Amino acid sequence: MSMRKFKTDKRLEKISAAAIARQFSLSVVLENIHDEHNVSAIIRTCEAVGIPKVNLLYTIEKFPKLSRISSASASKWVDTEKFSSVQECFGALRKDGFKIFSSYLDPSAKSLYQLDLTKKVAIVFGNEHRGISKEITDNSDEVFYIPMKGMIQSLNVSVAIAVSLFEALRQREKKGMYQKSELAQKELDELIDKWCKK
């Protein structure tokens, strides 16, 4: 039996709108991000942009314990998948048709604003101190940087991800990608029913 009848019309309308806006062609990979509060803040940003899943790639650091306080229950609406090798993570993404764009401050990198983020892309961000690994850069389709005009050429990783994802939102909104679900109607109905039970 559908749970929808147990929700108010306003609540159902909000759930339906968020489900329709989910961007299954946009994903995020976090490589060895150490601070669990950063990870929770990132998941909250992903939920705000409509990203359905975050890939947790941990080859050095321990898998983070997610803070339910700073994520403001966003983890309830965003799936996570854990990987222990780049090969495993990138293999799964490429099998699903994703191109991989990685954040990396390098002379050969493109500006964030030169990227087409309306494609099926997974965006990779690395550790707060080490950045992304060489294995990531060697296996990415593109590397990019966020242009900055100040003396300090770095941002907190959760801020860098927010800047990048809201650029993706801007590009996708301009193309009307939030107005129509990427899911078939049956899959969309199943997602809405699932969320109504939360």
Image (tube, rainbow, N blue to C red):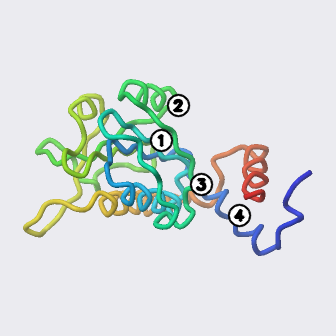
- Residue placed at 17% from the left, 48% from the top? 105
Asked if disc 3 and disc 2 are in contact, CB closer than 8 Å, the reply is no
Disc 3: which residue? 22
| 133 vs 18: above or below | above
Q: What's the distance in space between the residues labelled 3 and 4, CA to CA? A: 11 Å
Q: Which of 52 and 113 lies nearest the eye of the viewer? A: 52
Amino acid tagged 1 = Lys
Disc 2: which residue? 96
Asked if disc 4 and disc 2 are in contact, CB closer than 8 Å, the reply is no
Secondary structure beneath label 1? loop
In the drawing, does residue 92 fall left or right of residue 14? left
| 141 vs 185: above or below | above
Question: What label sits on residue 109 in the rendered view?
Answer: none
Asked if disc 3 and disc 4 are in contact, CB closer than 8 Å, the reply is no
Question: What label sits on residue 120 in the rendered view?
Answer: 1
Q: Which of 130 and 191 lies nearest the eye of the viewer? A: 130
Q: What's the distance in space between the residues labelled 4 and 1, CA to CA? A: 24 Å
* Of pointers 4 and 1, the one earlier in the residue sequence: 4
Q: Position of residue 26 (x, y in %)?
A: 48, 47
Q: Residues within 10 Å of mark 3 (few under 14, many from 20)?
A: many
- For this orientation, the residue located farthest to the left is 151
Amino acid tagged 3 = Arg
Q: What's the distance in space between the residues labelled 1 and 2, CA to CA? A: 9 Å
Secondary structure beneath label 2? loop
* Of pointers 1 and 2, the one earlier in the residue sequence: 2
Q: In front of the other: label 3 or label 4?
A: 4
Q: Quadrant of residue 74?
A: bottom right
Q: In front of the other: label 1 or label 2?
A: 2
* Of pointers 3 and 2, the one earlier in the residue sequence: 3
In the drawing, does residue 192 fall left or right of residue 68? right
